[in-house]
Amino acid sequence: MMSSGDALSDIRAAVHSADRHFQIIDGGKDKKGGGGPPEAPQVEEDCPVVTIGHLDGAFYFLDRVGQLRVLKASQMTRRADLVALFGGNISWLKAKFPKTTKVKEKGQDGEETSRDVVVDFKINHAAEYLQRECFRAGLYGDHIQIRRPGVWPDPKGMPIVHCGDRVLVGAKLERPGTRIGNQIWAAAAPEPRPAAPCDAAEARALQQSIRDLWNFRIPGSDVIVMGMLACAYYGAAIPWRPAGFLTGGAGCGKSSLLEVLKSAIPLKFATNDASKAGIEQTVDGRAIPMLVDEASDRVDQRAARALLDLVLSATGGEGTKGARGGSDGIARKISVAGSIIMASIRPPDMEAQHLGRFTIVEMVAAHKGADHTAEHRDLAAWAKDIGPAMWGRAIAAWERYREARIVLRAAIGKAGCQPREMDQMGSLLAGWWTLTHDHVPAESEADDAVQGVIGYIRSADQVMTQSGTQQMIDFLLSQKVQMNRSTDRQPLNVLISRMLEPDRQRMQEEPEFQDVGYSRDNVAAVLASYGIRVVRANEPPGRSGQPALRASDGDGLWIWPRNAMLAALFKDTTFAGQKYIYEFARMESYRPPPKNKNGTERAVTIGKMKHKGCFWVRCCELGLSDDGE
């Protein structure tokens, strides 16, 4: 075994006999020519431009301040376009892709030397780098969401408030250009932002003022209005965004109430004369509430109905996703999301799908001698002052809103509300509760809250009455048609009821119906001219001895949908074209055209003609018979 002394001798011999001895480095020269340690290597600065992706020869970026920019390949080698992309600051480009020139200098000793000086950047190298980074980022498509100002949900549903020059994520203000998942918050002009949350007392004071200064037909309307306000604060962060309609006669104060709501909402779009296309173009890409005064007080009701159609898409999910063609032949995508509150003397004609999204708040004129004009103006001014803090309260209470909505939605269901109505009313009540309370409602509190707005809870029968199918049936049966051999006109429901009666019963009981114009044959001929044939539950066999063709038990109708006179009855209505046929097909008793044994379509005799394509519906579902459910 080697001793420690021998090992030490071997190490010394190896060091002294090495080809190159260890040297102490003094550090070279400093900037003044003296010695010193070497300078630390400079840390390479990140590129101030964010590459997003590429598609069809176009390259997508966030420029130096976070705006979305799109450059074609030919623009990538243009100095002006590259400099604009970097906001006029080319220091990073010069450091990354330096373009140098030789500069001669004379030292103190008179000796001439030369050195490289960076004078610009190499455009082609910069373009190549940016294109490589875009290809590395991947294809650009609809999966990448460019967010403009508004309130958006993060991947977990939490509201993120984009205020243009800042993005509020949780309790922290980030700079635009922030990317979370596939959402990118692009820079925009500064917008209002939430303030520190106010107390629940402030929200309750606003609700009390609304209750005192306006007259509502249905009790609990002040709760509904506060719910509209709260849901408007959440922008697109809530999956179901209720829409509201303030309506009433002249002088009821609907416009002044809408003004209070406008004042209390810092970030919004408000107008008193806008079309659907105008709103889409103005609000495109933003998640903000839209407030429209005099929404349907116009001669052209088609424009008003178009606004209602905007509600159907903008107030749910990702909002309106559409495309519009431009004069240059390039399609432009449209995106609109947010709650909508309208005010008008009367709402336009609404279909069932609109009624499921809208809550109509009916207002009545102030009591005789009462004038609250000054109070309305003062309340709007106060609402403007407290609005940012109220907005901050709603955003800060996001988790409480979600929990309250679950509890309140269940309570609404127990009260007999239909599922679609539960979403609407649950969101409104949860918004009101979040603003005016500091805790999640208990089950008993939720039940009390629902009872306070019970006038707004629509039962199954009410929903059915207001459905599109029922509206179509009511319209059709009320249409008056010309009787043969007479100048008289009778509603279709009267004629169908006449055909459902037992033979000669009505002629015996009502002598005036002995007129030939109201005989069964004449009434059947009139109905046949509109493509309708009535078959009674106990219809006797025809002359051939064959039983009457039917598709189910009970009284029923065969209807030929291609009848021109029948289609003309629905002209200029919401059921024009083929829409009335679609509504018939939604009926429970609807049966499609019958088939022969060989599978071919069977013709049905209506009047003196046979027609293929006829369908069957029960008279009991039309309300003309009581022979079944």
Image (spheres, rainbow, N blue to C red):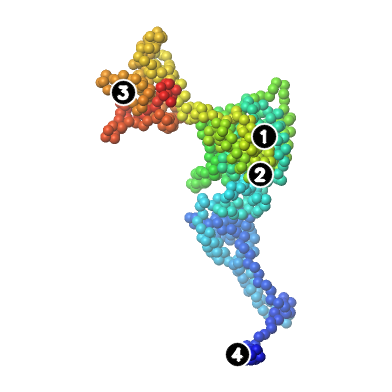
- SS at mark 2 in the image: loop
Residue farthest to the front? Answer: 1
- SS at mark 4 in the image: loop
- Reading the image, the residue beneath label 3 is 548
What residue is drawn where x is 36% and y is 25%?
553
How far apart are the alpha carbons under marks 1 and 2? 25 Å
Q: Earlier in the sequence, mark 1 or mark 4?
A: 4
What residue is drawn where x is 69% and y is 31%?
210
- Reading the image, the residue beneath label 2 is 397
Q: Is residue 582 visible?
A: yes
Q: Are marks 2 and 3 in contact (CB under 8 Å)?
A: no
Q: Are marks 1 and 4 in contact (CB under 8 Å)?
A: no
Residue 213 coordinates in the image, percent (x, y): 70, 29
Q: Residues within 10 Å of mark 1 (few under 14, many from 20)?
A: many
Which mark, by number, is residue 1? Answer: 4
Residue 70 coordinates in the image, percent (x, y): 55, 54
Q: Is residue 413 left or right of residue 589?
A: right
Instruction: Residue type at mark 1: give it.
Output: Glu
How far apart are the alpha carbons under marks 3 and 4? 121 Å
Which circle, 3 or 1, is nearer the viewer?
3
Which mark, by number, is residue 259? Answer: 1
